[in-house]
């Protein structure tokens, strides 16, 4: 018998699953059912975060909503912990479990576009790169994240921050409707005019209310060429660069989106060998508009001080979307701490400079996201996502290629986050590890959490879906 503790402190005891029960699930699914005895089990249980080594009793590789319904019924009847996986990119590994059931949506990866009406119908197993490839054929985009092998579903349900959000809003701000299989096996559609309460909760409330099997999004014109890339300076210049950056972005248009990066210069073809391994600070940028205008807007930042490398240029948006892929490879060990801050005050910059100098792993990094623009103009109560008033969002990664040195890097990330504690204003739910209910409460705020709790009682009163940043029903 396997005993696990799920987010929210809910204890789940999973008895061994009988061969008869597994055979029944196989008969009920059009998709594939895997146990530890099956070829492919180890491949499909692995997650992006290599530090998570979950061993589910059963993996249900679903092909559609009927498969999802059958899998939920099986997990409920067998009293198994249930995890839901799309891209498997969850930092804390919430898309797996020990001794339970993983509902794997990756085979549900169809994308259907109506370019004339600018509507995309997307199944829940689609990755960001797969969606971008299709939409960019028509010069369109669904606002999403910055790593192409991220799963669209998890990113969307937490809110969705990315390269075009300052112009077009969060991913949830372009969501038109979602199809959901609830805990009781009912299939419902949620949108502004249908199950509007659930639609509100899905836009930021994560996977707490059911398994989303498909989305409909509004698409926006973009590219296919954009002015984008990154400019690097030595970390010795970080304080001057950050002070200039702070003033420069304050006057930036909505089309401009930037992420400040701290790291050791990576061993990539575009990086000169003599720069590899040196601590740097970079401003990564994407201008979601005219390429020539983007060049003009980016010129002051690119020309500041003495950059050691500049790889900003006109390029396909799909290429820019893959810029961070080499830094976040499958199988590396990842630990993150995150917080929102209102502004880059001198005191915040002092913390950033100090801890940037302490980076020792070639995979550890900080991504400091510029917020605002269209994100901030949506009324705060319009969606469950919390943090529209944030000035910047920190994503502090203490990462390694494997277990060697991981504890040291994880502690560096925690110490960095702790040093920023006087300036915390909130946290983006998709950047949480398993940090407890106090942090979930911080992610949503008291008012939204009360509303989300009421929704949880309505749609999942037994907390069947608790492998998430959990909103308990009581």
Image (spheres, helix red, strand yellow):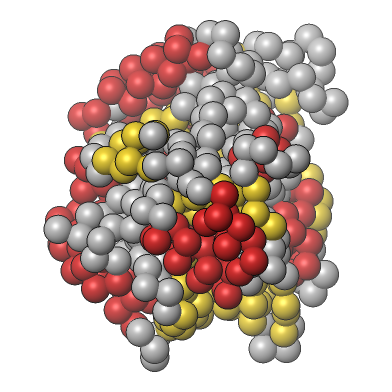
Q: Position of residue 433 (x, y in %)?
A: 39, 36
Quadrant of the drawing holding the C terminus: bottom left
Q: Position of residue 363 (x, y in %)?
A: 61, 21
Choose between 447 and 405: the one closer to the eye: 405
Q: Left or right: where does residue 236 sit relative to residue 226?
A: left
Q: Left or right: where does residue 155 sit relative to residue 387?
A: right
Q: Is residue 469 above or below residue 365?
A: below
- Residue at 78% across, 67% down: 134
- Residue at 39% across, 60% down: 76
- In the rendered image, which quarter is residue 289 located in? bottom right
Choose between 359 and 65: the one closer to the eye: 65
Q: Position of residue 200 (x, y in %)?
A: 34, 73
Q: Position of residue 270 (x, y in %)?
A: 82, 28
Is residue 307 shown to the viewer in this render?
yes
- Residue at 20% across, 29% down: 422
- In the rendered image, which quarter is residue 399 located in? top right
Q: Is residue 181 above or below residue 435?
A: below
């Amino acid at each position: 018998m396997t005993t696990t503790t799920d987010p929210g402190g809910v204890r789940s005891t999973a008895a061994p699953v009988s061969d008869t029960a597994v055979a029944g699930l196989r008969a009920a699914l059009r998709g594939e059912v895997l146990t530890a005895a099956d070829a492919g089990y180890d491949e499909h249980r692995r997650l992006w975060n290599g530090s998570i080594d979950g061993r589910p009793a059963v993996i249900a590789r679903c092909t559609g909503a009927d498969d999802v319904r059958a899998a939920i019924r099986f997990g409920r009847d067998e009293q198994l912990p249930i995890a839901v996986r799309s891209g498997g990119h969850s930092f804390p590994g919430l898309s797996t479990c020990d001794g339970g059931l993983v509902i794997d949506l990756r085979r549900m990866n169809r994308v259907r576009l109506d370019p004339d009406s600018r509507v995309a119908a997307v199944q829940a197993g689609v990755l960001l790169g797969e969606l971008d490839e299709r939409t960019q054929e028509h010069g369109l985009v669904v606002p999403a994240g910055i790593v192409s092998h991220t799963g669209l579903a998890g990113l969307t349900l937490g809110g969705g921050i990315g390269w075009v959000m300052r112009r077009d809003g969060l991913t949830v701000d372009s969501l038109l409707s979602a199809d959901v299989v609830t805990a009781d096996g009912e299939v419902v559609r949620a949108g502004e005019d249908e199950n509007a309460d659930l639609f509100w909760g899905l836009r930021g409330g994560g996977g707490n209310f059911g398994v989303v099997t498909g989305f409909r999004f509004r698409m926006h014109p973009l590219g296919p060429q954009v002015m984008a890339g990154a400019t690097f300076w030595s970390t010795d210049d970080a304080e001057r660069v950050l002070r200039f950056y702070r003033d420069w972005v304050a006057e930036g248009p909505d089309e401009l989106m930037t992420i400040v990066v701290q790291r050791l210069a990576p061993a990539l073809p575009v990086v000169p060998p003599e720069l590899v391994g040196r601590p740097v600070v970079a401003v990564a940028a994407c201008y979601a508009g005219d390429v020539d205008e983007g060049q003009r807007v980016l010129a002051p930042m690119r020309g500041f001080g003495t950059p050691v490398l500049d790889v900003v240029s006109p390029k396909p948006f799909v290429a820019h979307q893959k810029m961070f892929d080499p830094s976040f490879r499958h199988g590396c060990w990842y630990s993150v701490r995150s917080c929102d801050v209102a502004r880059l005050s001198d005191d915040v910059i002092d913390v950033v400079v100090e801890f940037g100098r302490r980076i020792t792993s070639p995979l550890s990094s900080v991504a400091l996201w510029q917020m605002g623009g269209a994100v901030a103009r949506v009324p705060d109560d319009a969606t469950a996502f919390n943090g529209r008033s944030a000035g910047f969002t920190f994503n502090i990664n203490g990462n390694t290629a494997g277990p060697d040195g991981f504890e040291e890097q994880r502690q560096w990330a925690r110490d960095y986050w702790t040093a920023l504690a006087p300036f915390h204003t909130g946290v983006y739910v998709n950047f949480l590890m398993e940090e407890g209910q106090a942090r979930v409460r911080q992610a949503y705020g008291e008012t939204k959490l009360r509303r989300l709790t009421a929704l949880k009682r309505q749609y999942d009163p037994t907390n069947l879906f608790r492998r998430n940043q959990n909103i308990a029903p009581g």
